[in-house]
Image: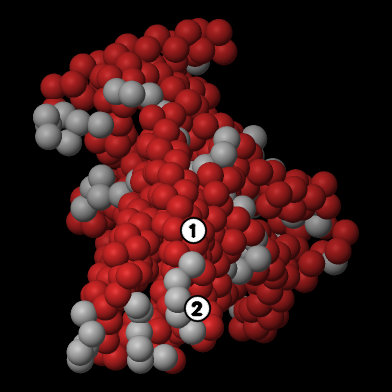
Amino acid sequence: MTQPYIILILGYIFGFYMAWNIGANDVANSMASSVAAKAITIRQAIFLAGILNVLGAVFIGSHVTDTIRKGIVTTDVMADPHVALIGALSALIASALWVSFATWKSLPVSTTHSIVGAMIGFGIMAGGFAVINWGKLLAVVLSWIISPLFSIVIAFGIFKIIVRLILSRRDTLTQALKFSPLFVGITLFVVVLSFLFKTPLGQRLAIGSPAALTLAVLLAVLLGFASTAALKRYLKKRESDAEAVFKRIQVGTACYVALAQGANDVANAIGPLAVIYFLVTTGSVGGKVPVPVFLLFFGGIGIACGIAMAGHRVMETMGKKITTLSNTRGFSVEFATATTVLAASKLGLPVSTTHAAVGGVIGVGLARGMEAVNFGIVFKIMVYWILTVPASALTSMAVFKILQFIF
Amino acid sequence: MRIPFFSMFMTSPFEGLQEHAEKVKECAWAFQQAIECHLAHECQTFEEFRQEIIQLEREADAIKRRIRGHMPKGTLMPVYNFLLFRYLREQDQVIDCVEDTLDWLSYRTEPGIPKELEKDFLILVDGVIDPIEQLSKMVAEARKYFKNYSEEQRVAVKKIIHTLHMMEREADKAEDTVKRKVFNMDIDAVTVFHMVRLAETIGDIADHAQNAGDMMRAMIAR
C-alpha cells in the first residue's frame, strides 16, 4: 500500500473520530432545551438529532466545508502535495486530540475552533506566519463576539414578542394559536432560504434571488397555516395553554437546530479529510476542493454515531439540571441558535453552535425570562473559547513535526 | 463545565425564597399554639413550641445563607438582586420577631400576661398570624407573574400586597389597644415594661410582613 493511501485511511479514522466528538459534545446544544421542557423524550431526541444532523450535513453542509479549509491558511502551503497531505492529517489529529483532552478534563471547548486552531498551527509550520490569512482569522475572532451577540438579540427579541403577544394575554391558547403561523413561518422561511441558496440541490435548481425569496415566503405562509391547523387538531383539551402550543412547535425548532448544526459542524471533521481525499485522488490541490457527497454523508454518520453513543448520558444530566426552562423559553433559545448558525454559515464564518446556544440563553435571561441565569460564567467559558485556538495550534505543530519525521 | 450550555443554568433563588416563605408559614402555627398555651396558665408545652420555633428559625437562616451564597455576580434574574436580598431580609425578620416574642415571654413566665389583657393579646396574635401566612402565597403568585408577565397576574400579586397593608393596620390597632390598656392598669412597672415590649415585638411581625410586601411591589414594578 502506498503512503498516500495510509494517510487517507488515517484521515478517515480521525475524521470519523472528530465527527463522533462533535456529535457527543454538541448534541446538547440542539436538543437540550426540548428535552428539558419535556417536548420530546431523550430517545426521540437522539433519533431526531441523528437523522437531521446527517440530512443537514449532506444537503446544506457543502458550502461551509471548503471555506474553513482555504479561508484561514493561504493556498501557497498546499503547493507541495506532500506537505499539504501531512498538514491536513496533522490538523485532523491535533483537533481530535485536543477535543478528547478537553472532554477528559471537562473543559468547554468548541469543536469548530479546535479545527481552526489546528489549521493555523499547520500553516505556521509549513510556511511561517506569512501564510496565515489574518483577515480571515480576524473574521473568526469577530465571530466569537458577533455570533453570541446576534443570538442574544434574536432570543431577546423573540421572547419579548412572545410575552407581549401571547403570554401576557388573558387567553394564552387562542393567542398562541393565532400567532403560531408567524413563528412557524419565520422558522420555515429561514430553513427554506438556506436550503435554496447554499445547497448543491438549490444551485442545480438555479433559482434567482427574487424567485427564491418568493418561494420561501410562499412555502412559509402555506406551511405556517397548515401547522396551525394540525396544532388545533392534535392539542389535547386538558393542557390547553400557550406552553402546550409551544411544546409542539419546539419539536420543530429542535429539528431546525439539529439541521443547522449538521450543516455547520460537519465541515470541522470533513474539511481536512476532503483535502486529503482530493490530494490522494488527483495528486494536487487547488484553491477550492469540491467535497464529495459521500464524504459529507460519512461525516454526518460520524456525528450521528457520537450522538447515539454519548447523547443519552449528556441529556440525562441535563434533564436534571435545567428545570426552569418552559416551552416558550426553549423555543426562543432554539430559534435564536439555529438562525444564528444558519446565517453565519451562509456568510462563511466558522461559527460554533455552542456560542450561538449560549447567546440564546443569555438573550432570554436578559429579557427577564428565567428565574436565574449565570451570566458570569460566560466570561469563564470565553477564556476557553479563546484558549482553544492557540492550544490546538500548538498541538497541530507538534503532530505535524512528528508526521513529517515518519513520512 | 464541559458543556457550556448547562453551566449557565443555576438553581433559582426563587426556589429558595419559596422554601424560606414556607418555613415562615410553618412557624405561624407553632407560634399561635405557644401563645395560647402560655395564656392558659399551667402550660407544659410552651417551651416545646419555643424550641420548635428556634429550630425553624435556624433552618430558615440556613436557607437564607444558601440563597445569598449561591448568587454569583452577574446572575440574570427577572428582578434586581438587591431587591431580592432586601425582600429576603424582611421575610427573615418575620420569623426572627416570632422567635423574639417567645424568648421575651420565656424570660418572665410568672406572673405572665394579666387576665385583663388576655383577650387583647389574642386579637393581636391573630392579627399577625394572617400576614405570616400570606407571604408564601405572595411568593408563589409572584413566581407565576414572572412566568407570563400578564397584567392579571400582576394585579393578583398587588392584591396580596394590599391585603398585607390592611392587616398591618389592623395589627397596629390591636397593638395600640394593648399598650393603652397596659398604661392604665394598676400593675407594677416591670409588668408594664414586659407587656409593652411584648406587644411591640408582636406588632413588628406584621410590620416586617408589610415591608416584605413593599419589596415585592418593587420587584413586580414594570
Please say if A54 is above or below A167: below
Location of residue B189 in the rendering, given as x and y in whole percent from the top left corner: 53, 83
Q: Which residue is mark 1?
A: B176
Residue A218 location (% of width, % of height): 40, 9
Q: How is the image coloured?
A: secondary structure
| A299 versus A184 height, above or below | below
- Residue at image x 44%, y 58%? B177
Which dot, 1 or 2, sits closer to the camera? 2
Q: Amino acid at mark 2?
A: Val
Front residue of A267/A382: it is A382
Amino acid on which the number 1 mark rests in the picture? Asp
Q: Which mark is residue A389?
A: none
- Residue in front for this viewpoint, A231 or B199: B199
Residue at the spot 52% in from the left edge and 24% down from the top edge: A197
Q: Which residue is mark 2?
A: B192
For mark 1, give the secondary structure: helix
